[in-house]
Image (cartoon, rainbow, N blue to C red):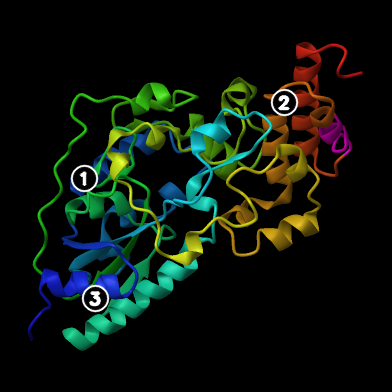
Amino acid sequence: MRLPLREDLLQLARKHGFADVGVSGVDLAADEQHLLDWLAEGRHGEMDYMQRHGTRRSRPAELIPGTLRVISMRRDYWPGEARDPFEVLDSPDLAYVSRYALGRDYHKGMRAALARFAEALAELARPHAYRVYVDSGPVLEKALARNAGLGWIGKHTNLISRSAGSYFFLGEVLTDLPFEVDEPATAHCGSCTACMPACPTGAIVAPYTLDARRCISYLTIELRGSIPEEFRPAIGNRIYGCDDCQLVCPWNKFAQAASNPDFKVRHGLDAPRLVELMRWTREDFETRMEGSAIRRIGHAQFLRNIAVALGNGPAEPEAIAALESRRDDESPIVREHVAWALERLKRASPEGCR
């Protein structure tokens, strides 16, 4: 049996819409210890799934018996046509949505592409046992991608490519094909720490260490209940995720614009007005967010985040009216955050909230 060379894998990966590919082994002992320490410190917050699978998350051969290699692939998502992110962040009447979520949800499309890649690989080599993952299974994708040579894990804990920055998704094919492995990527952050002070909530507590409980992406997406009041002001107008640590990373001058049409901006989410989003009914939300990653958080959590953003903005009559319209919302979480926002605007402008 002749296994495809790296050039063959790259050609096949690009045929299926991926920008780069690499192969790693399954030894993640050092990363496993880092994960266990992180979990022991409780820095995963309410993301119980991070520990649910035990060591299978860091041991691919235990997750899928017979796995010998992991093929990691990169798909770029930067929406080049989107409104400048700094302009949006500097406009308190607008809502900031993490750039990865401006288009369609990437999970389904990437899983299908990975499966087609794996099936085509069987024709080049031999039938093989495989399983594909896209940020949905217990896989240490960044560590595997680093070992496959796709990039290094930066001080903000995102994977960085020298040729493409960090605005990309990762996918994996676990296989029993004994490919030659690639050289792991070396780190190139050097003395740069731009990402650390850029984090609005100080979630990057040390180089290469993220406390998810402080991270705006966690607070606006993963956290289902009440956002701790201490973090609400720092959230600003970010209603779904946060890109600040990546926006200041020097390596993102090499970011590649997405070629996949799925990642084009939909419904004006690159710079929507907060008051308009607050008017969305549940039906509006379900319809407009069909096929979007944002739909996963649900309408109530969506409104919760918008209420916080409005509370962080100016005490304009339109903003106050938008919050007042949700004062008696059916969700206690929405009501709580609306009340906080109105009180905050009242303190900012006593004449504005009566």
| Residue wearing tag 1 | 162
- The residue depicted at 41 percent of the width and 67 percent of the height is 110
Where residue 22 sits: x, y (%)? Answer: 19, 62
Contact (Cβ within 8 Å) of mark 1 with mark 3: no
Seen from the viewer's position, the closer of residues 303 and 267 is: 267
294 over 318 or under it: above or below:
below
Where residue 169 sits: x, y (%)? Answer: 38, 56
Seen from the viewer's position, the closer of residues 294 and 27 is: 294
Position of residue 284 in the picture relative to residue 178 (left or right): right
- The residue depicted at 24 percent of the width and 75 percent of the height is 12
Tell us which disc is closer to us: 2 or 1.
Answer: 1
Q: Is mark 2 on a helix, strand or loop?
A: helix
Q: Spatial distance from mark 1 to mark 3, Cα to Cα?
A: 22 Å
115 over 55 or under it: above or below:
below
Position of residue 59 in the picture relative to residue 170 (left or right): left
| Residue wearing tag 3 | 12
- Span shown in magenta: 321-328
Contact (Cβ within 8 Å) of mark 2 with mark 1: no
The numbered disc on residue 311 is 2
Dot 2, crowdedness within 10 Å: few (<14), some or many (≥20)? many
Q: Is residue 126 visible in the rendered structure shown here?
A: no
- Write down the quadrant of residue 40 in the picture: top left
User: N-terminal of the two: label 2 or label 1?
Assistant: 1
Going by the numbered disc 2, the residue's amino acid type is Gly
